[in-house]
Image (tube, rainbow, N blue to C red):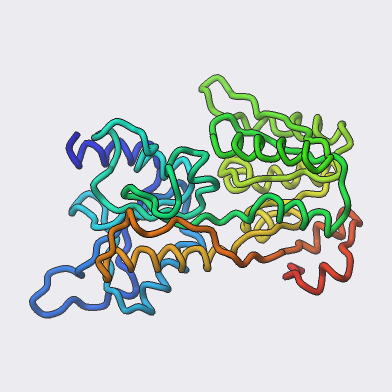
């Protein structure tokens, strides 16, 4: 498959591609028509603080970068999210030529690179893909919830169009058996076009609330935690459901009550460090470990806390960032 044909296919799957000259680029040297490093960014949504952190790191490294699309073959591709990264790079066992396999790919926001079959192993990845996962380990997330209030039932929503949501459901189910809590799971139904139906979210959340769950866990899902984050958190509030979220923006920009995660800007900077290793240091992408940040932040949305009249213990407030 030609590069142009592959890129057209990728564009259709990834939904949004952006072309901006990096602030770090500046004017090219006198005898150089373009900055030396070209990065394509493939995103299913507008740029966020992760991409700002990615650009900021490259600027501090003084790496001149231009992000390009089809006009010239990029030297590196940045992707956001499990679905987008799989659309670009494919699973590790995909047939040769079906996906982009000859250009380094650096991802962010991939929940489970192994479970999604993006990578066979993390260190070294052994293919043209590496990157940074943003999600805290599930046991650490569950401990954070218990730090707020003990729980016996945990609600969870699966989007059948996002494989990572099922991977999280499977992991939660295993931990539920080990730790002695009940997982109350509902699936978003599909509409006539085969896509998850946002109009069904009220019924899904009401069914979970009727099972008397202690918390609704909202995992790393583009559909639930980004595209429809306002709707999901408002419906949870209407149902008097406390929400714990595994990603940042749904707490910071919507009404999720609290969450534990890596800050997006830190994820972006770490991904940029890996990109710089490829572009400036000449390292092979298949030797650069795919990793998760080891430091996580607890964020509490105080207006949601007040609306639910469910205040956190002082010990938690001492270590959390609080949104007023």
Residue found 77% across the figure and 35% down from its top: 205
Number of numbered discs overlaid on the protein picture: 0
x and y percentages locating residue 262 in the rendered image: 60, 62
User: From this viewpoint, which residue is outermost toward the top?
Assistant: 192
* Depth check, front residue: 49 or 220: 220
Identified at 45% across, 55% down, the residue is 290
Please state if 97 lies on the left or on the right of 299 as rendered.
left
In the rendering, at what x and y percent does residue 320 appear? 75, 69
Does residue 294 appear left or right of residue 69 in this picture? right
Which residue occupies 30% across, 53% down?
104
Q: Nearer the viewer, residue 213 or 201?
A: 213
Seen as rendered, the residue at the extreme left is: 31
- Residue 304: percent from left, percent from top: 80, 57
Q: Quadrant of residue 259?
A: bottom right
Is 269 positioned to the left or the right of 28 in the image?
A: right
Q: For this rendering, which residue is in front, 290 or 323?
A: 290
Above or below, comparing residue 101 to residue 319 in the picture = above
**Residue 275 position by quadrant:** bottom left
Residue at horizontal 41%, vertical 45%? 85
Q: Is residue 288 left or right of residue 31?
A: right
Q: x, y percentage for residue 260? A: 69, 59
- Vertical comparison of 30 with 75: above or below: below
Which image quarter is the C terminus in? bottom right
Quarter in which the N terminus is drawn: top left
């Amino acid at each position: 498959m030609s590069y142009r044909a592959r890129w057209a296919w990728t564009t259709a799957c990834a939904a949004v591609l952006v072309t901006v000259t990096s602030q770090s680029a500046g004017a090219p040297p006198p005898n150089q028509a373009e900055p030396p490093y070209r990065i394509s960014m493939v995103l299913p949504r507008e740029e966020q603080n992760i991409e700002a952190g990615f650009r900021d790191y490259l600027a501090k490294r003084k790496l001149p970068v231009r992000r390009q699309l089809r006009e010239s073959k990029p030297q590196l591709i940045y992707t956001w999210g499990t679905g987008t990264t799989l659309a670009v790079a494919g699973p590790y066992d995909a047939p040769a030529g079906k996906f982009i396999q000859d250009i380094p790919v650096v991802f962010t926001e991939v929940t489970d690179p192994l479970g999604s079959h993006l990578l066979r192993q993390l260190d070294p990845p052994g293919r043209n893909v590496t990157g940074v996962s943003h999600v805290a380990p599930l046991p650490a997330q569950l401990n954070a919830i218990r730090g707020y209030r003990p729980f016996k039932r945990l609600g969870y929503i699966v989007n059948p169009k996002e494989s990572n949501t099922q991977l999280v459901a499977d992991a939660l189910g295993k931990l539920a058996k080990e730790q002695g809590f009940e997982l109350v799971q509902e699936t978003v139904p599909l509409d006539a076009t085969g896509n998850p139906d946002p109009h069904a979210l009220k019924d899904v959340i009401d069914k979970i609330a009727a099972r008397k769950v202690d918390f609704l866990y909202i995992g790393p899902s583009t559909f639930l935690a980004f595209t429809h984050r306002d709707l999901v958190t408002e419906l949870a509030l209407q149902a008097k459901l406390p929400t714990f979220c595994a990603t940042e923006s749904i707490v910071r920009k919507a009404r999720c009550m609290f969450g534990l995660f890596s800050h997006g800007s830190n994820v972006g900077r770490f991904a940029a460090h890996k990109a710089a290793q490829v572009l400036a240091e000449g390292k092979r992408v298949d030797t650069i470990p795919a990793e998760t940040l080891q430091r996580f932040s607890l964020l509490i949305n105080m207006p949601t806390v007040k609306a639910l009249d469910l205040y956190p213990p002082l010990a938690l407030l001492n270590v959390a960032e609080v949104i007023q």
